[in-house]
Image: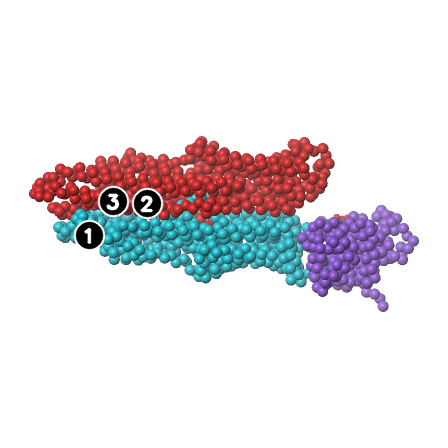
C-alpha cells in the first residue's frame, strides 16, 4: 500500500510584488509519519514556502497541497488538517497560557478539552506548572514558543508546519522538543519544519531539503545521508558548489 | 552634544510623515478658524453698523422727548476672532430709558439657537483641544519608547550626560510642536493686517500675549507627556495615561469645576431678582400714591368755602409749585427704585463673584482652564464682560436721562399723555402734539467699556503664571525621574 | 467558531489594563453626569420656584387688577433636559405676558450666568460624543492590525477560520465588551435620579433609555469605523493617527463649522433688523393713534369715573386695531425670518450629518425635548397662555390694553372702606407641557437611523477590507 502524501509542494513558485523570486519551482512531499526539515540561509525562501501552505500568500505558480487539497483553492478546508508553530510565537498578552490554549484549541475545532488536558500538554512541552495560569505578558520567548507548540499539539492535525520552532529554546528544551517531534511523527503526523539547526535536523528528520535563493537545491532521505557530513554538504550548497 | 540631541529629536519629529500630516492639518485648522473668525467679525460689525443707524433713526422719529428710548448695542470686538469666550452667550443690546433698568438681552445664541447647538470654533479652542492632544501624542513615548526600541541603551553606551539628554529631548519636542503653532499664528496676524481689521495698538499687544499664552500652554503638555514617558516603563501604558490626562484636563476638570461651584454656591436667577425689584417698585409707587392722595386733600382743604373765581385764582397761583413738588417726589421714587435695583444687583453680583472665585479656583487645576481663562481675559470676552457693560450702561443711562429731561423741558412737550381732571372744567386729555423729527444733537454717546490694561494683565498673569508653574513642575519631575531612569 | 471569537474578544478587552482605566473613568464620568444632572435639576427647580414665588410676591398689597400690567411666566426645568442639555440653557426662560403684543423669551441660563457658558456642563451628550466615541477609537484602532503586530493573526489564520467570521466576531466582541459594561453605570446613574429627587415620568424613562441606546449605537459606529481603518492600515500607530484625526474632525471641528457653513448659503435677517422694522412700524401706528386720542371727547364730562372708563374703552378699541395691523405686519416679518431660519437650520443639520457624533447630539436633544423645537414650543404655549391671561384680565378690569391703561383713583375719605387687595392666585397658572416625546421620535429615528447607516457602512467597509487583508 502506497502511503499517500500529506504535505506536498508541486512546482511551487512565488514572486513578490517587488519582483523578488522568493520560491522558485520547488517540489517536495511529506508523508504521514515523516519529518521534513528545510535548511537554508537567511532569505532562502523557507518562511515563504510555509506561508504558501497556510494561504498567507498566493503562489505565483504551482500548488501547495495539504492532504491533497490545494491551499490557495480551498484554504479553510486545507487548514483543518494542519497545525502551525511560527518562529516567534505571539499570543494574547493579557490571557494566561491556559486561556490562550483554550481559545486556539477552539479555533482549531477542538472544544472537548478539559483543564487537565491543558495542564498535561503544557507539561509535555516543558512549561513549568506555575506558569500555566500566568498572563503571557511576562513570558520569555522560549516560554511562548512552548505554548505555541502546545497549541499545535492540541489541534491534533495530521500535518504540522513549523517555522524555526526551536529558536529561543534553551538547549535542554530544544532537545526535548526534538524528542517531542519524534513522538509526534510516531503518532503518524507529517511534519514540515524549517530550521537552522543542522545537527538536530540530521538527528530527527527523515528527509532534509536545502534551499538556496528560492530553489530546493538538495533533497535527501536519512538513508541517503548516511555517512555524509551534512554540515559540509550544507556549506557546499550554500557556496553553490553543486551547481 | 546637546545640539546634536535637539537636532536629532527635531528631525525625528519633523520628518515623521505622520507627524507632518497631523500637524499640518492642525495648522490649517488654526488658520481656518481665524479666517472664519474674521468673516464672522465682519458680519457682526456690519450688523452693528446698520442696527445702530436704525436705532438712531428710530430715536429721531420717537413720540417725544420723554418717550425717547435709546438702544445700546455691544460693539463687536476684533479680539473675538481669536477667543469668542462668552461673547455669544451674553446679551448684545440693552434699552436705555428712564422707566426700565438696563439689561443686556438678545444674545447671539438666544436669537439664533441653531448656533448654540454646536457653538463655534475659534483659535483658542483649537489650541486648547487639538494642540494639547498633539503635544501629548508626540511625547508620551519620548523616553520609554526609546527604551522599547533599544535605542536608549545604545545612546547611553556613549558618554552622554543624562541631564543633557532629557533637556535635548524636551527642547526638540518643544520646537517641533511650537513651530507649527507659530507659523499659522504669524500668518493670521498677517491676515488681520491685510484684511484691515481695525485693531488698536493695545489689541495687537493683547494678541501677541495671547499667542505667547498658547505657546506656554503647549509647553505644559509637552512637559507632561515627557514626564509620563519617564514614569511608566511601557509606552502603551503612558499612551493610555496621556489620553486620560488630556481628557481630564481639557474636558472634565473645567466643566466639573464650574459645575461644582454652581452647586456649592447657588446664585438666584435674574428673574427672581427682577421680581424682587418690581415688588419694591410697586410698593414704592403705592406709597407715593397714598402720599399724593393725602397731599391733594390738604391742598384742596383751603378751597372749602371759596367762590369759583377764588378757587381758580388760588389754583393758578399754586399750580406751578404743586407740580414742582409732585415732580420732585416722583423723581425721588424713581431714584429709590433705582437705588434698590442697584442694591439687589450688587447682592446678586457679590454672590456670583463668590461662585466665580470658587469655580476658577477649582477649574484652574487644569492647565486648559488656565489657558482659556487667560485667553478670554486677554480678549475681553471673559465673564466680566457682562458686568462691565452693565456698569457702563448704568452710567450712560444717567447721562442719557438727564439729557432727555433737559430737552423735554426745553421743548415743553413731554410727549406723554396729559390728563387733566378738574371738577370745574371736567376732563381734558392731551396725547401730545404732532411733531417732526427730534433733533438729537448733543445727545451723550455711549462709550464702549474695555477692560483696563492693568486689570487684564493682573488676571491674565495669574493664569499665565500658573501655566508657567505647571510646565516647570512637569519638566522638573521628568528631569528628576530621568536622572535615575533604568535605561536597560 | 464565531462564539469563540466573540468570547475571546470580550475576555481580551475586559482583561486589559486599557479597559480597566477606561471603564473606571467612563463609569465615574457617567455617574458624575447623572449626579450633576440631578443636582442641576434640583437647583433649577429651586430657582424656578423662587422666581415664581418672587413674581407672585410683587403683587402683594395690590388692590386693583388694573395695576397688574404684566405677568411673568417661566419655563420650568425638565428632568431629561438636565441630562441632555441641548439648547435648554441657551434659550430664554422668562416671558413677560401683557395680554397682547409679541412675546419674547429672555434670561437664558448661560446669559444669566456666563460662567457656565465658558465650559458648559458635563451632560450625557458630552459623555457620548466626546468620551464614548474616544473609547471606541481607543479600542478599535488596533483591532486588526494590532493582532497582526502581535503576531496572533498568523496563528489564528493557521486555523480554518473564515475571514468573515473573524471580522464579525471581532466587531461584535469589541462592541459587546465595551457596551455591556457601560450599561452598568448608566443603570446606576438612572437609579440615582429618583434618589436625588428628580421626578422622572414614564415617557422620561423611555426617552432616557432610547438616548442611552442611541449613545451606545454612536459608540458602535465609531468602533466599526475604527475596525475598518485598522483593517486598511498596516500599522496600528498609523491607524490611530488616522482615527484620531477623524475623531477630532467629526467630534470637535465639523459640528462647530456646520452652522457657520450654513451661513455661507442661507442668510437669515438679523433679529435687530426685524425688531427695528417692527418698532418703527409700531411708532408709526402710535403716531396715528395719538392724533385720534387728541380728538377724544367724552360723552359725559362731569363724571370723572365715567370718563376714565370711557377713555379706557376708547383706548381699548385703538389698541385692538393697532394690534391687528401690527400683527399683520410683524407676522409677515416673523414668517419671513422663520422660513429663513428653518432653511438655515435644515442646512446646518444636513452639514452636521457628516458626523455621527453630531447626529447623536441632534437625536438625543430631540427626545429630551431640548432641541430647537423647545423654544418654538415654549413661545407657542406662552402665546396660548397670553390669550387666556387676556381673557382673565378683561374679566377683571373690563379692558385689555396690553398693560397700557389709565388708572385713576378718587381722593376719598380716610374713613371710607379700604379697598381689598387682589388675590393674584386667581391669575391663571402657566403650565408648560414639554414637547411630546412622540413628536421627537420621528426626527430621533431619522438621526439615529443615519448613525446606524454609518455603522453599517463601516462594517461593510471593514468586511471588504479584511477579505483581502494580508494576515502574515
Ligand atoms: N513581503 C515581501 N515582499 C518582498 N520580498 C519578500 C517579502 N517577504 C520575503 N521576501 C523576500 O523573499 C525571500 C525569502 O524570504 P523568506 O522569509 O522566505 O526567507 P527565510 O528562508 O525564511 O529566511 P530566514 O532564515 O531568515 O527566516 C527573501 O529574499 C526576502 O527578501
Ligand atoms: Mg524565515
Residue at image position (83%, 62%) is A186
Residue at image position (64%, 57%) is C11
Left or right? Give the position of B30 relative to A69.
left
Which image quadrant: the N terminus of chain C?
bottom right
Residue B78 vs residue B70, the one in the foreground = B70
Residue A234 vs residue B472, the one in the foreground = B472
Left or right? Give the position of B95 relative to A122.
left
Q: Of discs 3 and 2, which sits in the foreground?
A: 3
Q: Chain of mark 3?
A: B
Per the model, the C-alpha gap separating discs 3 and 2 is: 15 Å
Looking at the rendered structure, whether the residues under marks 3 and 1 are on a common chain is answered as no
Q: Which chain is red?
A: B
- The mark found on residue B277 in the picture is 2
Residue at image position (47%, 54%) is C196
Q: Which chain is cyan?
A: C
Per the model, the C-alpha gap separating discs 1 and 2 is: 30 Å
Q: Which residue is mark 3?
A: B287
Q: Which residue is mark 1?
A: C417
Binning the other alpha carbons within 10 Å of mark 2 as few (below 14), some (14 to 19) or many (20 upward) gives many
Per the model, the C-alpha gap separating discs 3 and 1 is: 18 Å
Q: Chain of mark 1?
A: C
State which tag comes first along the sequence, 3 or 2: 2
Q: Chain of mark 2?
A: B
Image position of A133 with respect to B172: above or below: below
Amino acid at each position: 500500500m502506497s502511503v499517500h502524501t500529506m504535505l506536498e509542494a508541486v512546482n511551487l513558485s512565488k514572486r513578490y510584488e517587488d519582483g523578488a523570486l522568493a520560491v522558485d519551482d520547488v517540489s517536495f512531499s511529506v508523508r504521514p509519519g515523516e519529518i521534513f526539515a528545510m535548511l537554508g540561509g537567511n532569505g532562502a525562501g523557507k518562511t515563504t514556502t510555509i506561508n504558501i501552505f497556510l494561504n498567507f500568500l498566493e503562489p505565483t505558480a504551482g500548488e501547495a497541497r495539504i492532504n491533497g487539497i490545494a491551499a490557495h483553492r480551498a484554504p479553510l478546508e486545507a487548514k483543518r488538517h494542519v497545525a502551525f508553530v511560527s518562529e516567534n510565537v505571539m499570543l494574547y498578552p493579557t490571557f494566561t497560557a491556559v486561556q490562550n490554549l483554550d481559545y486556539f484549541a477552539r479555533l482549531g475545532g477542538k472544544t472537548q478539552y478539559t483543564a487537565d488536558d491543558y495542564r498535561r500538554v503544557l507539561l509535555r512541552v516543558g512549561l513549568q506548572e506555575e506558569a500555566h495560569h500566568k498572563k503571557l505578558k511576562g513570558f520569555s520567548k522560549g516560554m511562548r514558543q512552548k505554548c505555541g507548540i502546545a497549541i499545535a499539539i492540541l489541534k491534533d492535525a495530521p500535518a504540522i508546519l513549523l517555522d524555526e520552532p526551536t529558536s529561543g529554546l534553551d538547549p535542554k528544551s530544544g532537545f526535548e522538543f526534538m524528542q517531542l517531534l519524534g513522538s509526534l511523527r510516531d503518532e503518524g503526523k507529517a511534519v514540515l519544519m524549517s530550521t537552522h539547526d543542522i545537527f538536530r535536523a540530521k538527528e530527527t528528520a527523515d528527509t532534509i531539503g536545502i534551499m538556496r535563493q528560492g530553489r530546493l537545491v538538495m533533497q535527501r532521505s536519512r538513508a541517503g545521508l548516511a555517512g555524509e557530513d551534512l554540515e559540509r554538504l550544507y556549506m557546499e550548497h550554500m557556496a553553490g558548489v553543486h551547481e | 552634544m546637546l545640539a546634536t540631541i535637539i537636532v536629532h529629536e527635531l528631525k525625528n519629529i519633523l520628518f515623521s510623515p505622520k507627524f507632518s500630516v497631523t500637524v499640518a492639518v492642525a495648522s490649517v485648522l488654526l488658520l481656518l478658524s481665524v479666517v472664519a473668525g474674521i468673516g464672522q467679525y465682519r458680519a457682526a460689525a456690519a450688523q452693528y453698523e446698520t442696527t445702530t443707524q436704525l436705532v438712531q433713526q428710530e430715536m429721531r422719529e420717537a413720540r417725544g422727548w420723554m418717550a425717547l428710548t435709546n438702544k445700546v448695542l455691544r460693539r463687536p470686538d476684533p479680539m473675538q476672532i481669536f477667543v469668542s469666550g462668552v461673547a455669544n452667550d451674553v446679551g448684545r443690546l440693552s434699552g436705555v430709558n428712564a422707566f426700565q433698568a438696563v439689561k443686556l438681552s438678545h444674545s447671539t445664541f438666544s436669537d439664533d439657537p441653531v448656533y448654540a447647538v454646536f457653538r463655534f470654533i475659534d483659535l483658542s479652542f483649537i489650541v486648547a483641544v487639538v494642540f494639547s492632544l498633539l503635544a501629548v501624542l508626540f511625547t508620551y513615548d519620548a523616553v520609554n519608547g526609546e527604551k522599547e526600541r533599544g535605542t536608549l541603551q545604545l545612546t547611553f553606551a556613549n558618554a552622554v550626560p543624562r541631564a543633557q539628554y532629557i533637556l535635548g529631548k524636551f527642547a526638540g519636542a518643544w520646537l517641533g510642536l511650537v513651530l507649527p503653532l507659530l507659523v499659522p499664528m504669524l500668518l493670521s496676524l498677517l491676515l488681520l493686517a491685510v484684511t484691515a481689521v481695525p485693531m488698536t495698538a493695545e489689541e495687537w499687544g493683547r494678541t501677541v500675549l495671547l499667542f505667547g499664552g498658547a505657546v506656554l500652554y503647549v509647553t505644559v503638555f509637552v512637559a507632561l507627556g515627557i514626564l509620563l514617558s519617564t514614569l511608566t516603563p511601557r509606552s502603551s501604558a503612558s499612551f493610555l495615561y496621556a489620553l486620560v490626562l488630556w481628557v481630564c484636563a481639557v474636558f472634565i476638570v473645567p466643566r466639573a469645576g464650574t459645575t461644582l461651584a454652581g452647586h456649592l454656591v447657588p446664585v438666584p436667577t435674574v428673574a427672581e431678582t427682577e421680581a424682587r425689584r418690581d415688588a419694591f417698585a410697586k410698593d414704592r409707587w403705592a406709597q407715593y400714591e397714598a402720599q399724593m392722595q393725602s397731599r391733594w386733600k390738604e391742598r384742596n382743604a383751603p378751597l372749602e368755602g371759596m367762590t369759583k373765581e377764588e378757587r381758580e385764582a388760588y389754583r393758578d397761583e399754586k399750580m406751578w409749585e404743586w407740580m414742582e413738588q409732585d415732580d420732585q417726589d416722583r423723581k425721588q421714587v424713581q431714584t429709590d427704585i433705582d437705588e434698590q435695583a442697584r442694591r439687589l444687583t450688587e447682592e446678586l453680583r457679590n454672590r456670583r463673584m463668590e461662585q466665580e472665585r470658587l469655580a476658577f479656583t477649582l477649574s484652574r487645576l487644569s492647565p486648559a482652564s488656565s489657558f482659556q481663562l487667560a485667553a478670554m481675559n486677554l480678549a475681553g470676552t471673559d465673564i466680566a464682560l457682562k458686568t462691565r457693560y452693565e456698569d457702563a450702561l448704568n452710567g450712560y443711562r444717567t447721562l442719557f436721562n438727564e439729557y432727555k429731561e433737559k430737552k423735554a423741558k426745553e421743548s415743553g412737550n413731554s410727549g406723554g399723555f396729559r390728563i387733566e381732571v378738574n371738577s370745574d372744567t371736567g376732563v381734558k386729555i392731551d396725547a401730545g402734539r404732532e411733531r417732526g423729527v427730534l433733533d438729537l444733537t448733543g445727545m451723550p454717546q455711549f462709550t464702549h467699556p474695555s477692560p483696563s490694561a492693568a486689570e487684564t494683565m493682573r488676571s491674565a498673569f495669574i493664569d499665565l503664571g500658573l501655566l508657567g508653574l505647571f510646565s516647570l513642575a512637569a519638566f522638573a519631575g521628568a528631569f528628576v525621574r530621568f536622572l535615575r531612569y533604568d535605561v536597560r | 467558531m464565531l462564539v469563540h471569537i466573540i468570547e475571546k474578544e470580550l475576555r481580551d478587552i475586559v482583561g486589559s489594563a486599557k479597559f480597566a482605566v477606561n471603564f473606571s473613568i467612563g463609569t465615574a464620568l457617567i455617574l458624575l453626569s447623572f449626579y450633576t444632572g440631578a443636582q442641576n435639576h434640583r437647583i433649577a427647580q429651586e430657582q424656578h420656584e423662587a422666581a415664581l414665588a418672587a413674581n407672585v410676591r410683587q403683587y402683594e398689597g395690590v388692590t386693583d387688577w388694573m395695576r397688574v400690567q404684566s405677568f411673568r411666566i417661566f419655563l420650568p426645568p425638565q428632568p431629561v433636559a438636565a441630562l441632555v442639555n441641548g439648547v435648554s440653557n441657551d434659550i430664554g426662560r422668562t416671558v413677560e405676558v401683557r395680554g397682547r403684543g409679541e412675546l419674547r423669551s429672555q434670561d437664558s441660563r448661560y446669559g444669566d450666568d456666563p460662567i457656565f457658558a465658558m465650559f458648559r456642563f458635563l451632560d450625557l451628550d458630552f459623555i457620548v460624543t466626546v468620551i464614548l466615541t474616544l473609547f471606541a477609537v481607543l479600542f478599535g484602532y488596533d483591532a486588526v492590525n494590532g493582532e497582526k503586530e502581535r503576531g496572533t493573526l498568523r496563528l489564528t489564520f493557521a486555523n480554518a477560520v473564515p475571514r468573515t467570521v473573524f471580522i464579525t466576531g471581532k466587531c461584535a466582541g469589541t462592541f459587546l465588551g465595551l457596551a455591556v459594561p457601560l450599561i452598568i453605570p448608566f443603570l446606576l446613574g438612572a437609579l440615582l435620579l429618583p434618589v436625588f429627587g428628580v421626578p422622572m415620568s414614564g415617557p422620561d424613562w423611555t426617552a432616557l433609555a432610547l438616548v442611552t441606546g442611541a449613545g451606545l449605537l454612536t459608540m458602535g459606529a465609531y468602533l466599526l469605523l475604527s475596525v475598518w481603518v485598522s483593517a486598511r492600515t498596516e500599522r496600528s500607530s498609523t491607524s490611530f493617527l488616522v482615527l484620531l484625526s477623524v475623531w477630532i474632525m467629526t467630534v470637535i471641528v465639523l459640528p462647530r463649522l456646520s452652522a457657520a457653513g450654513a451661513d455661507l448659503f442661507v442668510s437669515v435677517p438679523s433679529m435687530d433688523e426685524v425688531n427695528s422694522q417692527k418698532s418703527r412700524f409700531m411708532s408709526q401706528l402710535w403716531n396715528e393713534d395719538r392724533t385720534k386720542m387728541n380728538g377724544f371727547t367724552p360723552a359725559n364730562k362731569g363724571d370723572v369715573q365715567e370718563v376714565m372708563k370711557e377713555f379706557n374703552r376708547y383706548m381699548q378699541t385703538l389698541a385692538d386695531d393697532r394690534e391687528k395691523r401690527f400683527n399683520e405686519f410683524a407676522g409677515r416679518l416673523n414668517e419671513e425670518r422663520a422660513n429663513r431660519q428653518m432653511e438655515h437650520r435644515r442646512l446646518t443639520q444636513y452639514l452636521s450629518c457628516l458626523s455621527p457624533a453630531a447626529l447623536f447630539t441632534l437625536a438625543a436633544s430631540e427626545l429630551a425635548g431640548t432641541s430647537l423645537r423647545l423654544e418654538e414650543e415654549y413661545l407657542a404655549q406662552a402665546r396660548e397662555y397670553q390669550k387666556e391671561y387676556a381673557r382673565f384680565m378683561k374679566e377683571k378690569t373690563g379692558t385689555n390694553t396690553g398693560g397700557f391703561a389709565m388708572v385713576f383713583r378718587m381722593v376719598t375719605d380716610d374713613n371710607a372702606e379700604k379697598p381689598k387687595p387682589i388675590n393674584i392666585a386667581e391669575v391663571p397658572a402657566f403650565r408648560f407641557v414639554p414637547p411630546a416625546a412622540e413628536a421627537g421620535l420621528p426626527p430621533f429615528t431619522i438621526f439615529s437611523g443615519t448613525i446606524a447607516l454609518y455603522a453599517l457602512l463601516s462594517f461593510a467597509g471593514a468586511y471588504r477590507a479584511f477579505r483581502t487583508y494580508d494576515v502574515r
